[in-house]
Image: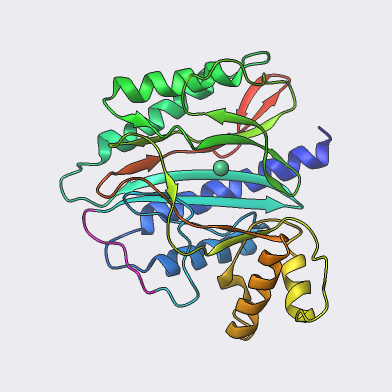
């Protein structure tokens, strides 16, 4: 890794951490989710970064990918178990971090949140050159099971690369055999999810997160300005909220056409069974010459 890249990774990690900590303090009953997400994205820009993906905040049985629509007025409520996921990039180099906030009056989700945080700590302690992703997954699973919860088995940590939020290796939240090994110079995010259910999520509801996976095959008939706005994100995930300066009808038509061509992928919310609570804790790590550096700590 060259010096510029490492400097950008460190700066992105620092900004992501500041955003996460602001969210931890400011997610309160009665506050709208959209206010929190928009404030986080503004904070990223003010600090010399930009969103690596739309800020997201998923409540209760929603594990991930809840992102406000442009007119979302949903508020956090007393009793909620709230995840917040912040991704920041600096010149394409990404820091990805998440935490969970307990909005119950009696602290009932705190053991669940602590289980995911302890699993992340166990994972970080396990990572080293030559260690397999499955060994890290086993440390996560062991920690969450010992606390009396289940890991979510169909969500994983992931490698990070310039302009790419998800690259190899996938880092499972359970002890899968085999898989890749960690090598020096790697940057990756580990994100244990602990839940009160069986530990499997499904896509449910309307997507607000999208990603342009390839340039449109037929740009004819597409709104040029909107298309160039979409392409300015360089293939990073985007939200419908990013494009409010365009006519909503034009945004819908363009998104649909791009999706039909296979250029745009939708990411709907990922949800456990009704009534199940989910907690997540995430850090971005760099396996450097002197060992593990937690970039978002
Ligand atoms: Co992540």
Q: How is the image coloured?
A: rainbow
Query: Which residue lies at the image location 29% right of the left edge and 44% below the top edge?
Result: 277
Q: In the image, is residue 163 part of the stretch drawn in magenta?
A: no
Percent x, y for residue 46?
Answer: 62, 64
Magenta residues span 73-79
Q: Is residue 156 above or below residue 107?
A: above
Q: Position of residue 148 (x, y in %)?
A: 26, 25
Spot the residue most to the top: 130
Q: Is residue 257 left or right of residue 137?
A: right
Q: Is residue 190 visible?
A: no
The residue sitting at 75% across, 51% down in the picture is 92
Give the answer, above or below, for where 135 lies relative to 5.
Answer: above
Quarter of the picture for ligand 1?
A: top right
Of all residues, the one furthest to the left in this rendering is: 106
Query: 28 and 173: which one is in front?
Result: 173
Q: Is residue 273 above or below residue 74?
A: above
Res. 171 image quadrant: top right
Q: Is residue 95 above or below residue 65?
A: above
Task: Say if residue 28 shows up in the picture.
Answer: yes
- Of residue 160 and residue 26, the one placed in the foreground of this image is 160
- At 79% across and 80% down in the image, what residue appears? 224
Instruction: Give the quarter of the image for residue 180.
Output: top right
Residue 15: image location, x then y, percent: 59, 50
Secondary structure, magenta segment, majority class: loop
> Which corner quadrant holds the N terminus?
top right
């Amino acid at each position: 890794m060259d010096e510029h890249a490492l400097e950008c990774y460190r700066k992105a990690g620092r900004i992501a951490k500041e955003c996460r900590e602001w969210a931890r303090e400011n997610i309160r009953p009665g506050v709208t989710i959209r206010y929190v997400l928009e404030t986080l994205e503004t904070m990223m820009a003010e600090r010399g970064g930009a969103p690596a993906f739309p800020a997201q905040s998923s409540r209760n049985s929603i594990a991930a990918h809840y992102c406000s629509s442009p007119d979302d007025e949903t508020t956090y409520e007393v009793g909620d178990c709230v995840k917040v996921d912040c991704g920041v990039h600096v010149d394409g180099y990404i820091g990805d971090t998440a935490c969970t906030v307990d909005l119950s009056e009696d602290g009932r989700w705190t053991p669940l949140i602590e289980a995911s945080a302890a699993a992340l700590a166990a994972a970080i302690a396990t990572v080293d050159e030559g260690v397999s992703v499955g060994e890290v997954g086993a440390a996560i699973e062991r920690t969450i099971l010992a606390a009396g919860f289940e890991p979510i088995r169909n969500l994983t940590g992931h490698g990070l690369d310039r302009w790419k939020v998800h690259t190899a290796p996938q880092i499972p939240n359970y002890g899968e055999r085999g898989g890749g090994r960690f090598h020096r110079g790697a940057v990756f995010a580990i994100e244990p999810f602990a839940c009160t259910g069986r530990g499997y999520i499904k896509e449910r509801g309307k997507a607000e997160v999208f990603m342009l996976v390839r340039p449109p095959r037929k740009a004819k008939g597409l709104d040029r300005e909107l298309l160039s706005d979409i392409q300015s994100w360089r293939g990073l995930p985007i939200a419908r909220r990013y494009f409010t300066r365009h006519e909503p009808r034009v945004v819908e038509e363009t998104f649909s056409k791009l999706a039909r061509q296979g250029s745009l992928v939708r990411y709907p919310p990922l949800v456990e069974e009704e009534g199940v609570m989910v907690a997540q804790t995430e850090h971005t790590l760099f396996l450097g010459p002197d060992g593990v550096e937690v970039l978002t700590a």
